[in-house]
Amino acid sequence: MSACPHPPSGAPDPAALREHARDACALLKALANEDRLMLLCSMGSGRCNVSELEAATGIRQPTLSQQLAVLRQEGLVDTEKEGKFVYYRLDNPQAIRMMATLWEIYCAPQEAPSTTQP
């Protein structure tokens, strides 16, 4: 097997590549939890309060609050207080793109296979 060819022109230098890899790992680590993934998916269509998230995902307290805290700490969601409600929304461009891709792969309606014969 031959060695890796020279990087294409415009490729990031190794230090920048390592930083990007670190950022990607942090995002993937945050997404690598079923509860957090379900919460982010529920926020994909807009902001939600805790009661709405609980109803949409079936995740109960205190797990719900713990996972929302992780998402806030990782900078994936933002909060907005309105009266007695706290609303959560996706607030990270990379997470938004990743969730859209995951939705497309796993959740989007699939086209039915063609039943026409040649």
Image (cartoon, rainbow, N blue to C red):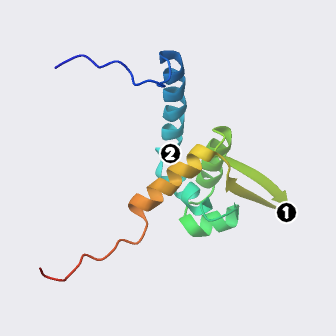
Give left or right: position of 30 versus 86. left
Q: Amino acid at mark 2?
A: Leu
Residue 70, image quadrant: top right
Circle 1 is placed at which residue position?
A: 84
Q: State the SS at label 1.
A: loop
View extreme (front): residue:
9
Percent of width and height locating residue 82: 85, 62
Disc assigned to residue 6: none
- Label 1 crowd (10 A; few <14 / some 14-19 / many >=20): few
The residue depicted at 18 percent of the width and 83 percent of the height is 116
In which quadrant is the C terminus drawn?
Answer: bottom left
Q: State the SS at label 2.
A: helix
Q: Amino acid at mark 1?
A: Lys
Percent of width and height locating residue 90: 65, 53
Mark 2 or mark 1, earlier in chain = 2
Percent of width and height locating residue 104: 44, 61
View extreme (right): residue:
83
In which quadrant is the N terminus drawn?
Answer: top left
Is 42 drawn above or below residue 24 in the view shown?
below
The residue depicted at 60 percent of the width and 69 percent of the height is 55
The one nearer the camera, 69 or 77, is 77
Percent of width and height locating residue 75: 66, 40
Residue 86, image quadrant: bottom right
The residue depicted at 83 percent of the width and 57 percent of the height is 81
Instruction: Compute the Cα span from label 2 to label 1.
Output: 29 Å
Give left or right: position of 90 versus 25. right
Disc assigned to residue 31: 2
The residue depicted at 23 percent of the width and 78 percent of the height is 114
Residue 16, image quadrant: top right
View extreme (bottom): residue:
116
Is 39 drawn above or below residue 22 in the view shown?
below
